[in-house]
Each structure stands twice: as structure tokens, then as C-alpha cells.
Amino acid sequence: MKLFRLAKEKPGKYRADDLSGNGAALAGGRWNPRGMAALYTCCHASTAVLEARVHASGLLPVANFFLVTLQVPEDIFSTAYVPELPTDWDALDRDPVSTVDIARSWLNAGKQLAMCVPSVVCPSDNNLILNPSHPDMRLVGVFDKQPFLLDRRLFV
């Protein structure tokens, strides 16, 4: 099975195909507390584009983006943790404490490779958050990495 990420690359600093989850650990996010590694992925390439767009603060990014396609175990959905969503899971003005707490517990438990959650920008699509510390992370690999230009019309 394949998952997708739209990621930036800065030569000498970070690579788009880095699977460590360190970027999320530095910033924290809706589904991970600052200081805990997590790898955000999308089930569709188009959802990865939407996710990148909403995190661009309205400005056309000039960064070197790559569409990274990951090969993951076929049973990733059937074994994924699916949390009960709190009422504020899709808050737009902040990363809810409730979702960060869910992720902290899930990451600390270390039982599943993936947590399946809906995308805030397209709730009918799923995102899979991967736990880079899980032993099955060794089964996740980069299938493809292609330069990707964000369409300027997304920013008008």
C-alpha cells in the first residue's frame, strides 16, 4: 500500500524523504506533542497538497517541495489505532490539547505503527500518523520522491 507526503527539502539541513518524524517533534502538531516524533502521511496525494496549502499561511512557498510516496505494510489500516474523536478535533485556530493528549498516549503505548484520523481540510479523507519508534517502521520505505510545484492558483 502507498501513502503520501508533500515535504520540503533544504540541502544540508533536512531531506524530504526523512522518515524520522523529527520535524513534527520540533514543531508539535494536532496529533503529536512537541518533543515526540510522529510522521504525518496522507492516503491521497491530493490531500497531501491540501495539507501543505493550509500550513503555508496564505503565501506561495518558495521551498523545494517533493511528493514523497511511501510503501507501507498492506495491513496498516486493519492494525491502525482509530481514536474516538473529541468534539474539538477539527478546531482551526489551534492544535487542541485533547488531540495532542490522544497522540501522546498512543505514541507512548507503542502498540500500533499507525493512527488513522480524518484530515481536517478534507474530513472524508484519512491521514495516517506513523510512530517512528514502532518496530514495524522498518517495513516503511520511500517508494518514490518527485519534485513538486504547488499550483500558484492555490494562493490567489
Image: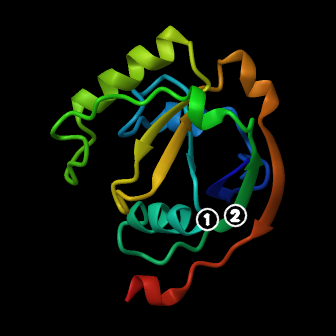
Give the CA distance from mark 2 to mark 1. 8 Å
Q: Please, which residue is most extreme toward the top here?
A: 109
Q: Nearer the viewer, mark 2 or mark 1?
A: 1
Q: Which residue is mark 1?
A: 45
Picture coordinates of residue 143, whole percent (x, y): 84, 52
Callouts 2 and 1 close, C-beta under 8 Å: yes
Taking 24 as reference, is 123 left or right?
left
Picture coordinates of residue 11, whole percent (x, y): 78, 55
Taking 42 as reference, is 100 left or right?
left
- The answer to whether residue 23 is above or below residue 151 is above
- The answer to whether residue 134 is above or below residue 33 is above
| Residue lying at 58% horizontally and 26% vertically, measured from the top left | 79
- Binning the other alpha carbons within 10 Å of mark 1 as few (below 14), some (14 to 19) or many (20 upward) gives some
Find residue 105 and report its image quarter.
top left
| Residue lying at 68% horizontally and 67% vertically, measured from the top left | 64
- The answer to whether residue 101 is above or below residue 6 is above
Label number found at residue 131: none
| Residue lying at 58% horizontally and 32% vertically, measured from the top left | 78
Q: Please, which residue is most extreme toward the left here?
A: 87
Q: Which part of the image, by quadrant, shows the C terminus?
A: bottom left
Is 23 or 1 nearer to us in this picture? 1
Label number found at residue 67: 2
Picture coordinates of residue 133, whole percent (x, y): 65, 18
Q: Secondary structure at mark 2?
A: strand
Q: What type is the residue that disc 2 sits on? A: Leu
| Residue lying at 39% horizontally and 39% vertically, measured from the top left | 29
Specify the color scheme. rainbow
Q: Earlier in the sequence, mark 2 or mark 1?
A: 1
Q: Secondary structure at mark 1?
A: helix
Picture coordinates of residue 66, whole percent (x, y): 71, 64
Q: What type is the residue that disc 1 sits on? A: Ala
